[in-house]
Image: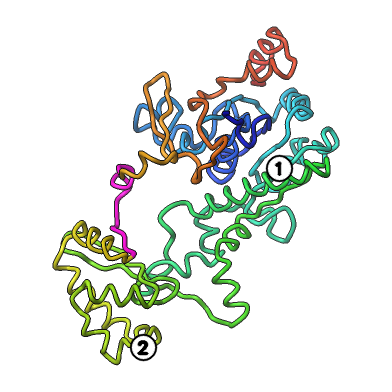
Amino acid sequence: MEMSKPFAGVKILDFTRVLAGPYSSYQLALLGADVIKVESREGDDMRYGNRANEWEKRGMAAPWISVNAGKRSITLDLKQPKAIEIVKRMVPTVDVVMENFRPGVMDKLGIGYETLKAINPRLIYCAVSGFGQVGPDRATAAFDGMIQAMSGLMSITGFPQNGPTRVGFAGADVMSGATAAFGVASALYQRTHTGKGQLVDVAMIDAVMGYLAQQFTEHLITGRVHEQAANLSVTRKPTGNLFKTEDGWMVLAVMTEPQFQRLMKVLGRADALADPRFVDWPTRIANNTALHEIIEAVMKTETSAAWTALFAKHDIPAGRVLSIPETAQLDLFQHRTVLQTVETEYGPIKVVGSGFRLEHGGGSVERPPAKLGQHTDEVLGEAGYSPAEIAEMRTAKVV
């Protein structure tokens, strides 16, 4: 029997824009939540990009689609009292409000947490900001690169000779979004046995630190300061590193003694097992450069594909460095659900869904990406407004 998705029946009024907030509400939409995306009359900044392709000209740029497919879109001019009235009218019928403005902005608009909580005590209000709702930096604007820098993430990324390095995606935004989704899910579950809503306060800097738990905890307990380690594993084991092959690059993830023994034998360098420089992990770490050179000298004689097959045969953990297009074409995705095809009026597109599978009611995109304001009449009608009232609001540019 087909089961409903985990958040089926949950309605979210989503004021978030750009990436961190929309990524969060997208995860909940994939799992069944009805997410109503509230946009200005001009639309989310990410909708149009540089208008360099047809999708951007349509107001559905690929980066915007990546975190907004499956949501319904309405437009509201929140500077107008009538728009604030609409929000307050909708709040009793929603479970969650999400926003990622600077702290205090929603209060100034008249739709902050305390105001909306008074209207709906069961409301879960999720606020994503750079430094949270309390503290001396609460009003400071924050962006992904800024948080990557301040959280310590950049200080442990990249090559020492090149200076601190950002990760290759908007890591702080995505980590914050995932944290916010988890926070909302937690609050929804808690409400099932308390009956009460609550504020979910997500500071981006907190969220990234949460992902760096190993590095921070080790420092706080032992005093160790993690530094940039290029492509070396966090274990510092030299066989957890990047190696050049005849036609590309591979990462080895050889972490145990049996794996190391098998690796050296497969490489034809069993003699290195008796070398006093490599008799155990402490000596191998101390002689990292020498061991790396021995391994890479052999790996450069064969292609990545040849090594992949040989390592798989001998149960040696390793992976080729693939480009995004190469990864997207892997056969394994024929058996997974993370890549999904969505039908649109312009033809089918592929989007990335949930990063996990559920036996019952897993994540999927149920609606094509919405045009700006596509569902305004529909949503306002659900809130009890008549067609004439909606037409009047359009004339007044409230919506």
x 14%, y 68%: residue: 301
The residue closer to the viewer here, 143 or 364, is 364
Tally of marks: 2
Nearer-N-terminus badge (2/1): 1
Residue 108: percent from left, percent from top: 75, 40
Kindly give the residue lying farthest to the left in the view shown: 301
SS class, disc 2 = helix
Which residue is tagged 1?
A: 105
Label 2: how many Cα within 10 Å (few below 14, some 14–19, many 20+)? few
Residue 8 lies left or right of residue 107; in this view the side is left
Residue 333: percent from left, percent from top: 37, 42
Residue 375 is covered by the magenta coloring: no
Residue 257 lies left or right of residue 370; in this view the side is left
The residue closer to the viewer here, 168 or 108, is 168
The residue closer to the viewer here, 89 or 361, is 361
Residue 305 lies left or right of residue 338; in this view the side is left
